[in-house]
Image (cartoon, rainbow, N blue to C red):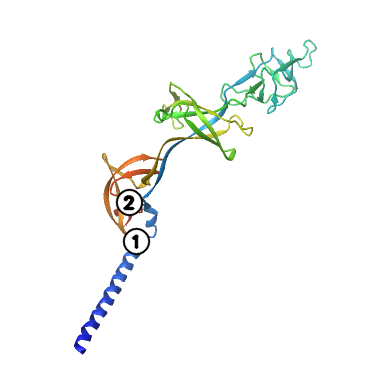
Amino acid sequence: MKKIVKPALWLVVLALLSALGFAGYTRYKKMLLREDLSDFIRTVSKGDLKLDMQESGELVSRDTVDIFPPSKGFIVEIIKKEGEYAEKNERIMMFKGGERIDSTQYVPVTIVAPRAGLLTRCVSTRGGSDAEVREGKRVDSSASCVARVVDMNMLAVNLQISEIDIFKLKLGMPVSITFTSIPGEKFSGKIDVIAPMAESKSSNWGGGGTKVFRVVINIDKPSQKMRVGMSAVVTANMKAKKNVLKAPIEALFQEGLNHYVYRQLQGYEAEKLQVFPGLRSEAEVELAGPLKPGDKLFTAAPESLK
């Protein structure tokens, strides 16, 4: 009986020692892993994937009229100020011709709004706004703009789209619009114009710059909060797929014409798998290949992380 018990006891002891040794080895291996290893791991998931294109633009009015004086002279009275609305043929300022404002040779005449709209400063040929029009301001000629009337019901967003992306857009394509100055609100619009001819966009770093196309977005329902010149962000949904296998795009590697991923096995151990990418968004990519939801992928070659 003692001979039977003794070997059994040794077997139990050996099993315990093996378990302790394995646990110690596992803990030792974990201690060798860098603490930030999880920062280089991404997870494969299954879900919807949307390809959105975002571009920044400027809010403009598609219907503006500049107002000019009858001759050179002086602004002697402001009746409607910049930022106020004027009706068609409403008096906005009084103008007096001549070389001197106190001259009695000329009688002050009324300048009226040629159409209804918001009164703003004139836009300089250099791209900025002209100086403020005030009482007593001298006007050098009849070609000097003194005010601009903006139709706030004809607001649009002007975009400059690169030649790489221009063929992704279609006339009538719906878009969403947000403004930094109007947080928390989203507006809808449609692509109304896609210029057939490219323009040169100058580069801040010198050189010839890049080629861009002018795209105009009509706003469906303009808001009174909008102001001409505001910065806008336009988002167009190009494509969408539902329930696809996807991963963060930084986990995808390319070697020649082939694409692959590093799937984590344990610690730094990984297997290199060829995959076939599909639809890509700014952050994620659709993947076909020997992957399943929950797989862990490296964003860098595992050997470089040790």
Rendering quarter of residue 82: top right
Q: Residue at x 31, y 65 (%)?
A: 29
Vertical position of residue 145 compared to residue 57: above or below: above
What mark, if any, has residue 218 been given in the picture? none
- For the residue marked with disc 2, what is the amino acid? Lys
Does label 1 or label 2 sit earlier along the sequence? 1
Which residue of the protein is positioned furthest toward the bottom in this rendering? 2
- Towards the viewer: 96 or 38: 38
Vertical position of residue 164 compared to residue 287: above or below: above
Q: Position of residue 270 (x, y in %)?
A: 28, 55
Q: Position of residue 139 (x, y in %)?
A: 68, 17
Vertical position of residue 233 compared to residue 106: above or below: below
Rendering quarter of residue 167: top left
- For the residue marked with disc 1, what is the amino acid? Leu
- Identify the image quadrant of the C terminus: bottom left
**Residue matched to label 2:** 292
- Towards the viewer: 72 or 38: 38
Q: Position of residue 32 (x, y in %)?
A: 33, 63
Q: Are marks 1 and 2 in contact (CB under 8 Å)?
A: no
Q: Position of residue 291 (x, y in %)?
A: 30, 50
Mark 2 element type: loop
Q: Residues within 10 Å of mark 2 (few under 14, many from 20)?
A: some
In the picture, measured across the screen, residue 225 lies left or right of residue 218, that is right
Mark 1 element type: loop
What mark, if any, has residue 33 been given in the picture? 1
Q: Residue at x 28, y 46 (%)?
A: 289
